[in-house]
Every structure is written in C-alpha cells, then in structure tokens.
Amino acid sequence: MSFNGLFTAERPVIGMVHLKALPGAPAYAGDLDAIFAAAWADADALLLAGVDAMIVENFHDEPFMIGEPTTEQLALMAAITRDIVLRSTIPVGVNVQFNAWQAEIAVAHAARAAFVRVEVFVDRVLMAQGIVEPCAAQITRYRAALGAKVQLWADVQTKYTTNIVPQPITQSAKDAQAAGADALIVTGAATGKATPLDDVAAVKEVVKIPVLVGSGTTAANAADVLKIADGAIVGSALKQDGLVSNPVSVRRTTEFMAAARTS
C-alpha cells in the first residue's frame, strides 16, 4: 500500500506514543505493567482526539545506544506495538532508537504495524554517542527477505546529528528516494524545535514521494506547516502542558487537529 493509501486525510497528522523507559535503560522504574498502561492511555487519547496515525517509540531510553536494542527491549516493544495495533483503527508505526533498523522491521512485521521511521537512511552521521552508519542497503534487503509489508519513512539529515560528508539536504533527499524510501521526514535541530519550512519546500521540489515535518509543529503553526508538507509527526504539542515528558492530552490534541484541518 502506498503512503496515501494509508490515510483518508490529505495531509495526515501522526501522534507519538512515547514509551516509558524500558528494562536496561537508565530510567527504567522496574514496573512493566506501568509501561503498558501508559502506552495504552496515550494511544487511546490520540485515537479519541482524531489523529491519523501514531508511532510507538522507546523515547525515554535516553541516552540512546546506537544500533539494536536488547532482547528484552525488543520483546517488550513488539508486545506493546501489537497491543496498540489491535486497539487502533488507524495506522501504527515503529521507531526504535537509535537507528535500530533490524529491530524496527522485525517489530513492525510481527506486530502488523504499517511503517517504520528510520533516522539514518543514506548519510553517515555523527551524534553525541558516536558515528552512525546509513542502513538503506541493509533495511531494504531485510524487509524483502521477511516479505514485510512495512513502509520506510526516512529522515534526511535528522535532528541531533551532523553529516560527516556535508551535502545539501536536497541531495540527501534524492539519495533516500533512490534508495527506496516510501516517505521522507525533515526535522528541526532538536525535539520540539521548528522545522525550517524552506528545507521542506526545497526537498519537495526534488522528490516525488511524500515529505513530512518531523518536529516543532504546534496548533499555532499547523496550518502553515501543512500548506507545504504532506503531513506532520507531532509529539510535544500534543502532551499535557506541551511537555514531551508528559502524557498525551486529549484536549490539546483535539485543538491541534482542529487547527491542522484548517490548512
């Protein structure tokens, strides 16, 4: 199924289910039931408020390890994602930090999720924890080997990273499209930071696949963002008090969706 085939909305809004810290992460609190309960609550709030899709992400496992999660983290993410898929009437995606491409495809395939978000698809980058290698060649082959019907949404020059070989974001976008991405994501410098709309417009000019904004969209700027982008992934703006560490707010999400639908 194509990106547009997933949605009834012309420019979808994708909310975030930010999981509490998983076993092995520094902030893990030792309560698996609490992790499940919080994930279900956020997913139900997003559904009630009318978002078009949601992504399950191990957001609170910071600082992130580069590469694949532990066995217990992988199992837990698969279980939670499957629960949310079964509870949902909208597409569900998976993001395993940081750039854990094999885990993402495995979890999404097992849980019957619709897509994964891949942070480092075609560019070799530097982040606080070290060098991250691009995974386009590996993830496309792994998806094919599993026969996984999972879309690849690829970041281009994603937040918190710097390209080791500098090049225009438009070149990264063209490279990602050529490597098999189903959609592209352009972000600001950090979580919650506004995405430069000039970058979004420039990327859209050079590719034929959808281009999403990956950070910094709020109720105040949603209409402007969605006049240019083909959709938006939204975390902080949908949380209580606008804080990314808080649970999803039905009121804020409903207000956001009303603003987004005016675009």
Image (spheres, grey):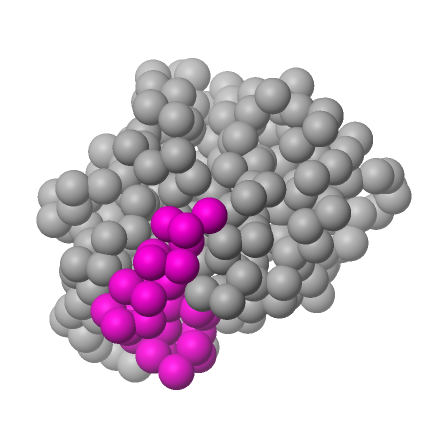
Where, by quadrant of the figure, is residue 161 drawn? bottom right
Residue 254 magenta-highlighted: yes
Q: What is the x, y in percent for residue 134? A: 66, 37
Residue 116 magenta-highlighted: no
Asked whether the viewer can see residue 152, the reply is: yes
Q: What is the x, y in percent for residue 126? A: 75, 54
Residue sitting nearer the eye, 202 or 221: 221
Picture layout, residue 254 above or below residue 83? below
Classify residue 171 as left or right of residue 250.
right
Asked whether the viewer can see residue 185, the reply is: no
Classify residue 255 as left or right of residue 35.
right
Picture layout, residue 171 above or below residue 124? above
Write down the region rendered in magenta. Answer: 235-263
Residue at the far right in the pictured view: 166
| Picture quarter with the N terminus | top left
Residue at the far front in the pictured view: 262
Classify residue 114 as left or right of residue 122.
left
Please tell me which residue is depicted at 29% across the width and 32% down the height of the picture. 8
